[in-house]
Each structure stands twice: as structure tokens, then as C-alpha cells.
Image (cartoon, rainbow, N blue to C red):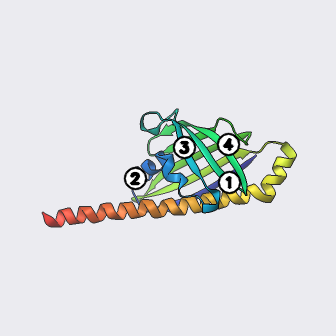
Amino acid sequence: MSIVTKSIIMNAPIEQVFMYYARPEHIAGHFPEEAKMKVIPIKVTEGWGVGTVMRIIGEFGGRPMQWDSITCEVTKNKKIVSKALNGPFKKNVITVKFEEINNATKVTFEVDYVLPYFIIGIIIDKLRLRKYVIKGIDVSLQEVKNAVEEKHKETLEKEITIKSEN
């Protein structure tokens, strides 16, 4: 069993950050290029909420992987949890938590996974996969931060322009 947890502060309102994460196709484009990550909606519920199923396709550690993931918990502006329904992992649960801190948002991204083949899975994880998971989360968090902060900056600039015209 491996749990990888990383956090970052994003200088944008919690509502904007949460809505960005609530759309999984936004996040897929922010993983390392070599992961070749794709997210394909299979079943979309209202607001991409509980019950939404996505197919995740990518390469992790140079190994092609694919699985279906279901959104199993959504607490607006607080938490999104999804878990694998099938695929190469015995367990794969992703939890993203949001916390408002002085007009900014702390995002904590946690991946809790278990590889098959108990002893062999542990060895593969220690030697290879865990590094890719950590790198993927780090790159994703930074890329999402850049995208969300840029969008927030544009929103503020529009508000300033509208106010100055009045």
C-alpha cells in the first residue's frame, strides 16, 4: 500500500480552484508529457458529480495503463474523491481537498494505491512507480496552479476595466 500526498497554495478563490478540479479533463492535460494522460468521459452526472465515470489512459513508468474511475464523493469547495473500478491496481483512490487560506486556496492531492502481486508489487512501487506518481502529482499541481492563477488574474483585470469604464 502506498499513499502519496502533496499540497500547494493557489492564489485564487476556492470556488475557482474547486470548479477547475471538478472537471477531470482539465487535470489530465497537466500531468508530465511522458504520461500521455487522457481522460475520456464514460458517464457524466450533473455537474460532474457523484457517479461520473471516466476512463483514464496513460503511461506510468513507461508502462501503458488504463482504468475506469468513478467519482464517489463531492463536497463543494471541500473535497473530491474518485476511485478505480478496474485496471492494474488492487486499490486506487484519489482525494483532492480544498482549504481557503487568506483569499487563496490550499490544495492537497492524495493518491492511495496498491499494486497487485503483493511482494513484487511492493518492489516495483519502491523502485519505479512511486517516483512517477510523485513527479506526476508535483507537475500537475504546479501546472494547475499556473492555469488557475492566470484565469483569476484575467478575471481581476476584466473587473478593473469594467469599474474604470463606469
Within 10 angstroms of label 4, few (less than 14), some, or many (20 or more) residues?
many
Within 10 angstroms of label 3, few (less than 14), some, or many (20 or more) residues?
some
Q: Position of residue 11 (x, y in %)?
A: 43, 62
Q: Position of residue 37 (x, y in %)?
A: 60, 53
Closest to the camera, between mark 1 and mark 2, is 1
Closest to the camera, between mark 4 and mark 3, is 3
Does dot 1 land on a helix, a strand or a loop?
strand
Query: What amino acid type should be assigned to the residue bearing mark 3?
Result: Ile
> Which dot marks residue 92?
4
Report how far apart the C-alphas of labels 4 and 2 lie in the structure: 26 Å
In the displayed structure, 21 sits above or below 159; it is: above
Q: Residue at x 50, y 56 (%)?
A: 106
Q: Position of residue 119 (x, y in %)?
A: 87, 46
Within 10 angstroms of label 1, few (less than 14), some, or many (20 or more) residues?
some
In primary-sequence order, the first of circles 1 and 2 is 2
Where does label 2 land, which residue? Answer: 16
Query: What amino acid type should be assigned to the residue bearing mark 1?
Result: Glu
Q: Position of residue 1 (x, y in %)?
A: 76, 46
Where does label 1 land, which residue? Answer: 59
Which residue occupies the foreground of this view, 41 or 80?
41
**Position of the C terminus by quadrant:** bottom left
Q: Residue at x 72, y 60 (%)?
A: 131
Query: What amino acid type should be assigned to the residue bearing mark 2?
Result: Gln
Report how far apart the C-alphas of labels 2 and 3 lie in the structure: 23 Å
